[in-house]
Amino acid sequence: MAKKILLEVVTPDKLLLSKEVDVVVATGVDGEFGVLHGHVPFLSSLAIGEMRFKDGNDTDYAAIAGGFAEVTGEKVTILAEAAELAREIDVDRAKSARERAQQRVEKARAEELDYLRAETALKKAMMRLKVAGRAGGGMS
């Protein structure tokens, strides 16, 4: 039987998750990476993206909005600016956030305002909706 790795997801507000899992897959700024027990230690900046983790036959998902991942052979620590487990995402609130962000992006383009900030808000909202849709699904 393969050894498990401890996954901890921490935001500025709380410890979101602390669980032993078989595999963690997260989205770094240079692309997606996967971690198993015994992985070589490394640090990675995280992009706005999806994180998934598998424990036996169960796969769970989380939306991660930037931060850092620290990997040791025994543990993965995700220090996220914001993070939500798929099953905890309020889909109606996320849809409203996406609509507001889309309007901000269009306004920023038209008025030459802070386009990058508006685009980041849109990416976060879209990622939350994507991850919320995965609740109860399998690892892809």
Image (spheres, rainbow, N blue to C red):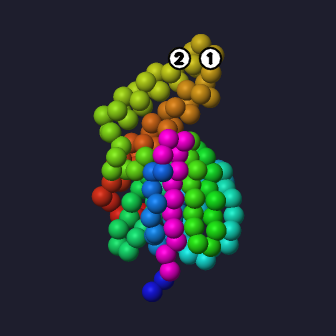
Q: Position of residue 107 (x, y in %)?
A: 53, 17
Q: Residue at x 41, y 56 (%)?
A: 61
Asked if the residues shown at circle 1 and circle 2 are in contact, with their CB atoms under 8 angstroms apart, the answer is yes
Measured as percent of width and height from the top left, residue 130 is found at: 40, 46
- Magenta region includes residue 12: yes
User: In this view of the protein, which residue sits in the foreground, 14 or 89?
Assistant: 14
Please state which of residues 119 and 1 is positioned toward the viewer in this rendering.
1
Quarter holding the N terminus is bottom left
- In the rendered view of the protein, which quadrant contains the C terminus? bottom left
Q: Residues within 10 Å of mark 1 (few under 14, many from 20)?
A: some
Q: Report the disc number at residue 107.
A: 2
**Residue in the image at 35% along x and 73% along y:** 57
Amino acid, disc 1: Leu
Q: Secondary structure at mark 2?
A: helix
Magenta-tinted stretch: 3-14
Residue 55 vertical position relative to residue 87 in the rendered view, above or below:
below
Question: Which residue does the numbered mark 1 point to in the structure image?
Answer: 113
Residue 60, how many percent across, how many down? 39, 60
Determine the CA span between mark 1 and mark 2.
8 Å
